[in-house]
Every structure is written in C-alpha cells, then in structure tokens.
Amino acid sequence: MTTFKKFKKIKSVLNEIPGIKTYKEFDILIEIGYHEELGKPLTLKQLTQLGIASQATLCRHLNRLVQEGMVKKEASADDRRSFVLRLSTTATRSFTSHFSKIIEHLGDCAVFSPKSRSRTFKKL
C-alpha cells in the first residue's frame, strides 16, 4: 500500500468520528482532551494562545461543539468569570473507539513497527 493511500485511510477514520466536521474541530478537541488528561483543563484564552485559529473562529467552532454535545463549558473554580473546557463523555467514547482503528492503519506503515507500537501502548 502506498504512503498516501495509508494517509487517506487514516483520514477516512477521522471523518467517521461523529460530531467533528472540520480538522480545526479535531485539533480543538485533541487539545482540550490532552490538557484535561494532564489535569489542567484549558480556558478559551489558553486555547486561543495555542494558535489553532483566531479567537472568533475558535468561538464559532466551540459553540458548535457545545451544541453537538462534544464539549462542556464549566465555570472555573479559580475565577468564576472564566470557563474551563472539557470533553463530554460522548466525545471521549468516540475518540477511544476510533483510536484503535487509527492504530490499525498506522500498523500498516513501516515507520510504526510492532516494536515501537508496544512501547507506545505501554505508555498509554
């Protein structure tokens, strides 16, 4: 299988994740989930500083993701004027179920050998 055919397969798996319509939304959800796993949920300001998109674009995508039930906005414990962003249970389940499909496609790549895969899974 050629390199770009593999990338197309991975892209098709990403397109199957419900609630995500654009790659910017995918990036937003990944950043929210990543920082949530670290125990430091993002605020809108912090998300803007990551440079994914302008603040207006982020707000537009976030509003849609909140309506779709993928993201929850919660009042910050430190400052009630700001909100922290968290993935919903639905979003977490969607990413978890599609992650194994992406790993399958990566397993077809020579760069992602079984040895490096086992090291990656130990870290997870």
Image (cartoon, grey):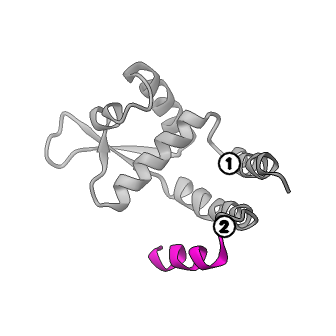
Looking at the image, residue 83 lies above or below residue 120: above
Q: Give the number of the disc on residue 100.
A: 2
Highlighted magenta segment, given as a residue range? 113-124
* Residue drawn 64% across the image and 66% down it: 112
Q: Nearer the viewer, residue 14 or 80?
A: 14
Amino acid type assigned to the residue bearing label 2 in the image: Ser
Q: Quadrant of residue 38?
A: bottom left
- Position of residue 100 measured from the top left corner of the image (x, y, whole percent): 66, 67
* Residue drawn 78% across the image and 45% down it: 4
**Is 23 on the left or on the right of 82, as rendered?**
right
* Residue drawn 62% across the image and 33% down it: 22
Q: Quadrant of residue 40?
A: bottom left
Amino acid type assigned to the residue bearing label 1 in the image: Leu
Contact? badges 2 and 1 (CB < 8 Å): no
Assign the N terminus to one quadrant of the image: bottom right
Tally the marks. 2
* Residue 38 on the magenta segment: no
- Alpha carbon separation for disc pair 2 and 1: 12 Å
* Residue drawn 17% across the image and 39% down it: 80
Looking at the image, residue 10 lies above or below residue 19: below
Q: Give the number of the disc on residue 14.
A: 1
| Residue furthest left as drawn | 78
**Is 54 on the left or on the right of 111, as rendered?**
left
- Position of residue 6 measured from the top left corner of the image (x, y, whole percent): 77, 53
Q: Quadrant of residue 105?
A: bottom right
Looking at the image, residue 91 lies above or below residue 62: below
